[in-house]
Amino acid sequence: MKRSFSAIALFLALHCGGQDALVHTYGGGGTEEFRAVVVMPDSGFALVGSTGSMPDMATDIYVVRTDSLLGCEWSLALGSAGVDTGRDIVLDEEGNLYVCGYRADTESGYDGVVYKISDEGEVIWEIALGGEAWDFAHAIDLDNEGMVWMGGSTYAGGVRKPWLLTFSAEGMNSGQWILASSGAGEVTDLVCTPSGILVCGWVETEEGIRRSAVWRLDQEGSVMWNRQDGEPGWNRQANGIAVNDEFIYVCGTQDTPTFTQGYSQRLDYSGAQHLISQEMQPDVNEYTAIVPVGGSFYSIGRTRAYGFGNYDGHVFRFTDSGGFEGGLFYGTGEEDSFIGGARVPGGFVACGSRQTVEGQYQAVVMRYTRPVLFSEDIMMPEEETCLPVSIPEIQEELRPFGPYRVYDISARLLQEGEARDLAEVKASLGSGFYLVVFRTGWSVRLVIP
């Protein structure tokens, strides 16, 4: 459904007052961004992205924990000496965080990585995913059995393929799937439900045109249905997916004869489409996250339509029937973007990056609980002294089971032997901090209380 956004002209610009609209920035003197956010049980937030403020000038995965007013509680920089990028984050029932992303490896190109982190900021374990090809982890979630599902892409025969893996809360690999037998593709987001796994991304036609893709899988990883959408001759990809009890919500970007535009899509659990809304604006407009709330949903992303040639972060709210309820722009006149978001009582939290007048990119978070969406162009953020704390990387990148070795924090060999799984290794260890390396190509960091 196409619609006019002339109502945007009615948006107001006003200064932030009180605590119903908060904006904070984080990081050091380098380049930072956030890509995903999760709401914690104490109403605080945990965020993941990337930081370029470490002494070696490399890019590390950046994890930040805040209180409910966005004050920094702790932060981590996770990665190697190369380029490391954080993409998604999820919370388990015990308050632990799972973070996924990817890092550059001098031997194999890129590997997907997953970290399990306690609510106090302690890394419980880390695993590297992939082989000799390039592998990327983009999205992560937990199913109702506590299994971790991760989606991204892997190169098979030189072609990027949509890739899905699952493993236990202890980091043990349980299975993996390639979701497209022919042509290129990629998983960009996923969400676990009691009845299965929903995955979105894109696949490529024989003519080299991208089409948005949504897959529904059962708990065993079997595909129940897959739908692909797009206009002939124009690229389209899905970037975000979310659900409620009745519907599946998807957002993404689609090329048009003039500009790339954002779109929102509402499906039922059989895969039938009930709404497609493409937002026609006078410049580039992208949706990267979607957040259902009651009978409405927020589409989160960025636009150049009102940024005088630069990007503004934006959030639009629609009814489930596609009616426009309001919108918000946030920008400083430089390059500003929202990338991820989540629901909070009475509103939303959005995260991304903000460029200063000096050209530095800062990680930015907005928590917004006003009943009406306003433009916040002049709402200046409060800067947090939330510098990343570096965690030493695991040097061994072996990958599961059979012969293994256990090292302590000083890289001293403690024991070696044969094991069927990680639980068997853990049972042989006392309290402490360990690195377990399996000969078949897998490593995990363990903290045993």
Image (tube, rainbow, N blue to C red):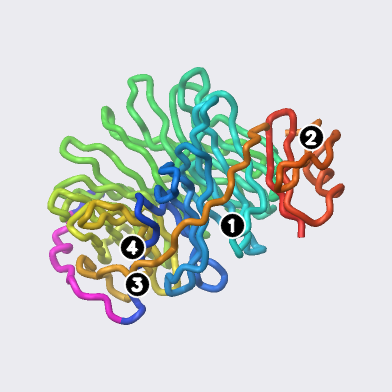
Q: Residue at x 46, y 26 (%)?
A: 160
Q: Which residue position is annotated with label 4?
A: 319
Q: Position of residue 316 (x, y in %)?
A: 29, 60
Residue farthest toward the bottom in the current orientation of the protein: 18
User: What secondary structure predominates along the stretch shown in magenta?
Assistant: loop
Mark 1 vs mark 4: which is more N-terminal?
Answer: 1
- Amino acid carrying label 3: it is Leu
User: Callout 1 environment at 10 Å: few (<14), some (14 to 19), or many (20+)?
Assistant: many
Q: Which residues are magenta?
A: 4-17
Q: Is residue 308 above or below residue 187?
A: below
- The disc at residue 97 is 1
Between marks 1 and 2 in the image, the one whose residue lies nearer the viewer: 2
How many residues crowd mark 4 within 10 Å: few (<14), some (14–19), many (20+)?
some
| Above or below, comparing residue 397 to residue 367 in the picture | above
- Tell which circle, 3 or 2, labels the residue nearer the N-terminal end: 3
Residue 12 counted in the magenta span: yes
Question: How far apart are the alpha carbons under marks 2 and 4?
Answer: 54 Å
- Please tell me the numbered disc located at residue 344: none
127 lies left or right of 108: right
Query: Which residue position is annotated with label 2?
Result: 404
Spatial distance from mark 1 to mark 2, Cα to Cα?
A: 26 Å
Estimate how packed mark 2 is, as few (under 14), some (14 to 19) or many (20 or more) residues with alpha carbons within 10 Å.
many
Q: Which comes sooner in the sequence, label 1 or label 2? A: 1
Mark toward the viewer: 3 or 4: 3
Q: Are marks 1 and 3 in contact (CB under 8 Å)?
A: no
